[in-house]
Each structure stands twice: as C-alpha cells, then as structure tokens.
Image (cartoon, grey):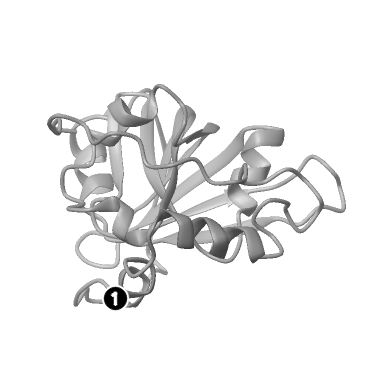
C-alpha cells in the first residue's frame, strides 16, 4: 500500500508538480505548542529544485506559524493528494528553512517559479526551502474525486493593491506575524524591500 522513495523523480515528480494544492504541517518543540496545518494553493508556487529539495513561495496572510516553527526547529511535512486520476497521497518529511527577501539566495531561488507571473502581487514575503529526509506515497482510496476549476483571485486582488510600504504596515499590525501564537519569533519585521528581479527564470 505504501512505498518509500529515495528521491523525487519521474512519476513522483510529475504528480507533485501537477497538483493545484498542497498542505504543510509544522509544530513547535513545546509539548503544549500549537500544531499548524496550512493549505497552499497558488498555481506554480511550488517547485522541485532537485531530487531531494522542493521550495514554495510563502505569501502574506494573517499568520506566520510555519515560518516561526521552521525558525525554531526546521521540521516540516508537505502533503499532496490526488483529487483526479489514480488515487495517491505523497508526503515529503524533512527540514525546512524560510529564505527571506534580504537573503542573498532569494533572487536566485525566485527564478525557479516561472509560472507565477508576478509573485509580489500576492505579497511574497519569503521562499521556503525543504530538504527531504523521507519521501513516501500511500493509497488515496478514501480521497474524494474533485475537479479543479481555477485559482481564486481574492488573495491576489487584496495584496496587489499594496505597495511594499503598505504591505509592511499590514504585516506589522497583525498579532501573529512577527510572533507566533506560542510566542516564537515569526516573520522578521520590518519587511525587507523587494530585491532586484532575476534576469530570467529557470525550468524547475
């Protein structure tokens, strides 16, 4: 029923890259800390960098729990489900790191997301890089069939109206952005400015 994979390649990679939504799970080290589970759903915002590394664009919102947990301990699980076609569930367990706008690696990493026309329109604040330690797929027999229509445009419409200063002000007034619900350091504020755009995108 389940299979462990040594690397992300072939059919497995094709499956991951074809999904329109994936989920991230993280938790703090404290036994009474808040476990976080988040859906990620902007098409093209996840890229397979190599056989053991994936990355996704971390867009603005009302919380920064994933970022806070990764800064504390790095543990993360990504999950994809097949809502169409053969049933399948893929999980990548590993260590993640948020790469912020002022990190020298940020611009180079951004080149791996050519399908996202303007990532800053969604309030891009970081790129999360995940190094896989365990790659598993299992049956998705109980996952229902659902059809994909299109991405919602509400998130983009909300954030594309904000310039960098307005985005920074929005993030700073949110209760659980700079600090997590459990008091861990979250997104570093003030928000660093947008770095220069990459010269060209690379195929992921």
Give the number of marks. Answer: 1
Residue 25 against residue 92 in the figure, above or below? below
- Mark 1 lies on a secondary structure that is loop
Residue 127 rendering spot, x and y as whole percentages: 42, 39
Residue 123 rendering spot, x and y as whole percentages: 40, 57
* Image quadrant occupied by the C terminus: top left
Is 89 or 41 nearer to us in this picture? 41
| Label 1, residues with CA under 10 Å away: few <14, some 14-19, many ≥20 | few
Residue 92 rendering spot, x and y as whole percentages: 45, 38
Q: Residue at (66%, 46%) from the top-left corner?
A: 186
Residue 116 against residue 62 in the figure, above or below? above
Q: Is 64 left, or right, of 108 in this rendering? A: right
Q: Quadrant location of residue 71?
A: top right
Q: Is 77 left, or right, of 144 in this rendering? A: right
| Residue topped by disc 1 | 152
Is 182 or 187 nearer to us in this picture? 187
Q: Residue furthest front?
A: 165
Q: Residue at (28%, 75%) from the top-left corner?
A: 153
Is 61 or 191 nearer to us in this picture? 191
Residue 14 rendering spot, x and y as whole percentages: 19, 42
Q: Residue at (29%, 52%) from the top-left corner?
A: 119
Residue 98 against residue 50 in the figure, above or below? below
Is 107 or 7 nearer to us in this picture? 107
């Amino acid at each position: 029923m389940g299979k462990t994979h040594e690397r992300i390649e072939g059919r497995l990679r094709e499956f991951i890259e074809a999904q329109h939504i994936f989920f991230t799970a993280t938790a703090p080290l404290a036994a009474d800390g808040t476990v976080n589970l988040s859906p990620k759903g902007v098409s093209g915002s996840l890229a397979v960098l190599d056989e053991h590394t994936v990355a996704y664009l971390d867009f603005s919102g009302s919380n920064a729990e994933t970022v806070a947990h990764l800064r504390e301990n790095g543990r993360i699980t990504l999950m994809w489900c097949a809502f169409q076609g053969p049933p399948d569930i893929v999980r990548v367990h590993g260590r993640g790191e948020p790469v912020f706008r002022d990190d020298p690696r940020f611009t180079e990493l951004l080149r791996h997301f050519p399908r996202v026309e303007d990532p800053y329109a969604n309030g891009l604040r970081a790129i999360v890089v995940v190094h896989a330690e365990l790659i598993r797929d299992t049956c998705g027999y109980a996952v229902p069939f659902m059809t994909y229509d299109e991405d919602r445009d509400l998130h983009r419409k909300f954030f594309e109206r904000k310039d960098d200063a307005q985005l920074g002000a929005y993030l700073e007034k949110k209760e659980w952005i700079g600090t997590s619900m459990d008091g861990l350091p979250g997104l570093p504020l003030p928000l660093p400015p947008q770095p220069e755009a990459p010269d060209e995108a690379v195929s992921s």
